[in-house]
Image (spheres, rainbow, N blue to C red):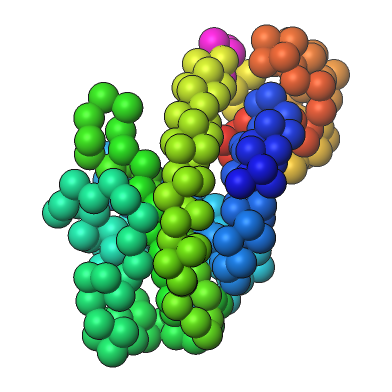
């Protein structure tokens, strides 16, 4: 538990705490993989919030809209249908055989360590509806009662992390909205790794003008490097 709390506290302001929290959560529980799903207006999504991230690229649907994959996930479907707040395993709601033979289970088994899954829901602040769920997975064995109890204790820490992340996202989104349209365009390109010369060519302006816009945007956003810009862009997506 302490590892997860320390990981959350060690995240730099303006960065996504999932980078540090997911690996710590995976290690604390002894899982092969850890993921973070959240509900957005058009469905459930994971973006690339999986630890270790390399395994995300192994999945056949990694580049497809993740809300489609999430809709096939029996655990997430169950969360939408029932007000479950306690951690639960996939095999609490479907048999291992049915999970293995399902469309999504067949894709995951045994690719990347989510054959046996334990879900830790986070209720919405204003209601008991689940809007976020942390998922732990293993290749070769189910989660024990002791590990379930550990996740139940970790749940309160994950609730705090989830809500702080939401607040950070809202703050970052508001900061980006305060930029001028030109600054927003440039910062978006900076966030995806474009060099100043590339941005200048694309926008048909001088490099000096690009650098001036970057300087003003950095000051407004209170960032000091391209890495921080990239983190902020990723946080709000």
Number of numbered discs visible in the structure rendering: 0
37 on left or right of 179: left
Residue visible at 59% across and 71% down in the picture: 32
Identity of the residue furthest to the left in this view: 81
Q: Was residue 132 drawn as part of the magenta stretch in this picture?
A: no
The location of residue 2, given as percent across then percent down, is 66, 43
- Front position in the image: 175 or 133: 133
Residue 51 in view of the camera: no
- Front position in the image: 71 or 115: 115
Q: Was residue 179 drawn as part of the magenta stretch in this picture?
A: yes
The location of residue 158, given as percent across then percent down, is 49, 41
Q: In which quarter of the view is residue 217 placed? A: top right
Residue visible at 31% across and 84% down in the picture: 96
Residue visible at 74% across and 41% down in the picture: 194
**Bounds of the magenta segment:** 176-181
Residue visible at 60% across and 53% down in the picture: 25
The location of residue 75, given as percent across then percent down, is 29, 63
Residue 119, relative to residue 190: is it above or below?
A: below
98 on left or right of 216: left
- Front position in the image: 226 or 55: 55
Residue 31 in view of the camera: yes
The location of residue 231, given as percent across then percent down, is 67, 36
- Front position in the image: 96 or 143: 143
Identity of the residue furthest to the front in this view: 146
Residue 31, relative to residue 216: is it above or below?
A: below
Residue 1, relative to residue 66: is it above or below?
A: above
232 on left or right of 162: right
């Amino acid at each position: 538990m302490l590892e997860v709390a320390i990981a959350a506290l060690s995240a730099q302001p303006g960065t996504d705490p999932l980078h540090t929290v997911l690996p710590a959560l995976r290690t604390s529980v002894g899982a092969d993989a850890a993921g973070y799903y959240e509900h957005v207006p058009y469905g459930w999504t994971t973006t690339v919030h999986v630890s270790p991230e390399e395994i995300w690229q192994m999945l056949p649907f990694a580049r497809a809209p993740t809300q489609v994959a999430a809709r096939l996930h029996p655990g997430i479907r169950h969360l939408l249908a029932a007000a479950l707040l306690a951690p639960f395993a996939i095999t609490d709601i479907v048999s291992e055989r049915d999970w293995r033979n399902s469309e999504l289970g067949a894709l995951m088994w045994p690719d990347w360590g989510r054959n046996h899954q334990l879900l830790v829901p986070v209720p919405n602040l204003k209601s008991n509806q689940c809007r976020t769920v942390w998922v732990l997975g293993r290749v070769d064995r189910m989660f024990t009662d002791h590990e379930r109890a550990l996740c139940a204790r970790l749940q309160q820490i994950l609730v705090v992390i989830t809500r702080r992340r939401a607040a950070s996202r809202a703050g970052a989104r508001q900061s980006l909205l305060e930029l001028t349209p030109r600054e927003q365009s440039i910062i978006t390109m900076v966030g995806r790794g474009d060099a100043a010369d590339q941005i200048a060519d694309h926008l048909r302006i001088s490099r000096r003008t690009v650098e001036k816009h970057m300087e003003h945007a950095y000051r407004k956003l209170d960032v000091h490097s391209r890495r921080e810009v990239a983190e902020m862009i990723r946080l709000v997506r």
